[in-house]
Amino acid sequence: MPPLILTEHIRISGIERLEVYRAHGGYSALRKAVSQMTPEQVRDEVEASRLRGRGGAFFPTGRKWKSLPDNGLPRYIVANADESEPGTYKDHYLMMRLPHLLIEGMAIAGYTAGAHRGFIYLRGEARRVQRVLVAAIEEARREGILGPDCFGAGRGFDIDLHMGAGAYMAGEETGMLESLEGKRAFARIRPQYHAATHGLYGCPTIVDNVETFSNVPWIVNHGAEEYRKYGVPSAPGTRLICTSGRVAKPGVYELPMGVTLREVIWEHSGGMPEGAEFRAAIPGGASTHILPAEFLDLPMDPDSYSAKGFLIGAGSVTVMDQRDCVIAMALRLGMFFRNESCGQCTPCRDGTDWLVQLLRKFETGGAKESDIDLLWDLCDNIIHKTICALGWAATVPPQSTIRFFRDEYLAHIAAGGCPYDNHPPEDTFGFNHDLEFPAGRPAYREDVNWYTSGLDALPVRHEYSADADD
């Protein structure tokens, strides 16, 4: 088992406070970077580590940092802390317990980029996280870590916290930048490296996920060679995986890259409840495939998943058992994407609603076998026809259930509706279908374990016990 790169100190009481964080080695990486390394050396170390983004796309972080153009414009650092994918809560937990780890990673990125200002874009509903981050930023300013003279190095860097309005689209990189600029969170038409070259206010910008920035201090302190010892060669290190659904111990677990679903569920999440039989799992959030048991032993790394045509996603594993209807799950996820579509692109705006209508026919009765092929064709007419990936993401649950659970669709047709009676009604998730548009969003609810558990007392790995600090 590799060391805990991110969560070694996460259970220490008061670790969110600066004095406690410093007492356990906090900000030593930033001090080392500004006093012993040049910006180029830091970038080279991050690139050599082969760190890849943890937001779901897994783009090489060092390559992104090196792609900033030298055009004389200001440079910015942006942490994407929106984390609004159903089932995903790892970044919120990381920020609640280790806010200074994120600040330190962003400050190192600011030093390497020559940036003087950074932003944390946080989802508007995350008020508890907001209070923790505000307190941490103020502490760092008072101690001179943030401000005009970072650690006396003659370089200034400061961070502002920006609260979004709760739109899922604001988690898309360019939609987030539009929101930061005070506009509606519409995705931009973009070439590769768009944010790096034409980011915030049209200036070079590094945009990374919270977990990605939080890996950087460990790499600076211990070196790229040590980091590459863990995980898999193409994607070293560890990653945070949050589990929910039909598992005995839902929570946040730091595990090596390349771990399998079987290990995540049975070795770290306590297995499934007594009497439960594995049916399917979503390996990385709402926009990833619903996979059957045959893929339990597939390594969860970007290359292994992409070789099968799967998306690895943002580290959110939702487990279903024999009582759960995969079509009902696809329907609820379809409702989520329909509700969160910004409406900019017609295939997504209209297509997601048609997906919901078709899936509901299977659930409530009236579907024909030809509707299975119609559903697949509808998905094909959305994929790659929108500016951002939301429309494409909405097609992944329906197409994966048709691909792996076609018999389920036939069973629904034969039964004249859903043969399962275990899943909650649609209005459990806040939708009012008497309105022209659905009201509300799928909520994070502790009494409905389809999306996530509460953030309180989440275990890190399986070693957590009631006797642990805090």
Image: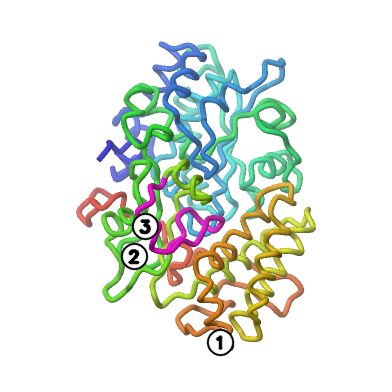
| Disc 1 crowd, CA 10 A, few/some/many (<14, 14-19, 20+) | some
x 61%, y 64%: residue: 336
Residue located 47% across and 36% down the image: 212
- Of label 2 and label 3, which has the lower sequence position? 2
Mark 2 touches mark 1? (CB < 8 Å): no
* x, y percent for residue 207: 59, 34
In this figure, which residue is indicated by the disc labeled 1? Answer: 414
Q: Give the image location of residue 281, x and y in percent.
A: 43, 62
Magenta residues span 281-300
- Report the disc number at residue 296: 3
Q: Is 468 located above or below residue 30 in the figure?
A: below
Q: Secondary structure at mark 1?
A: helix
The verdict on residue 428 being magenta is no
For the residue marked with disc 3, what is the amino acid?
A: Leu
Q: Tell me the CA gap for discs 2 and 3.
A: 15 Å
Three-letter amino acid code of the residue under disc 2? Val
Q: Give the mark nearest the N terminus, 2 or 1.
A: 2
- Magenta stretch, main secondary structure, is loop
Task: Tell me the mark number nearer the camera, choosing from 2 and 3.
Answer: 3
**Quadrant including the N terminus:** top left
Front tag of 1 and 3: 1
User: Is residue 299 on the magenta stretch?
Assistant: yes
Identified by mark 1, the residue type is Ala
- What residue is pinned by disc 2? 247
Q: Residue at x 31, y 27 (%)?
A: 25
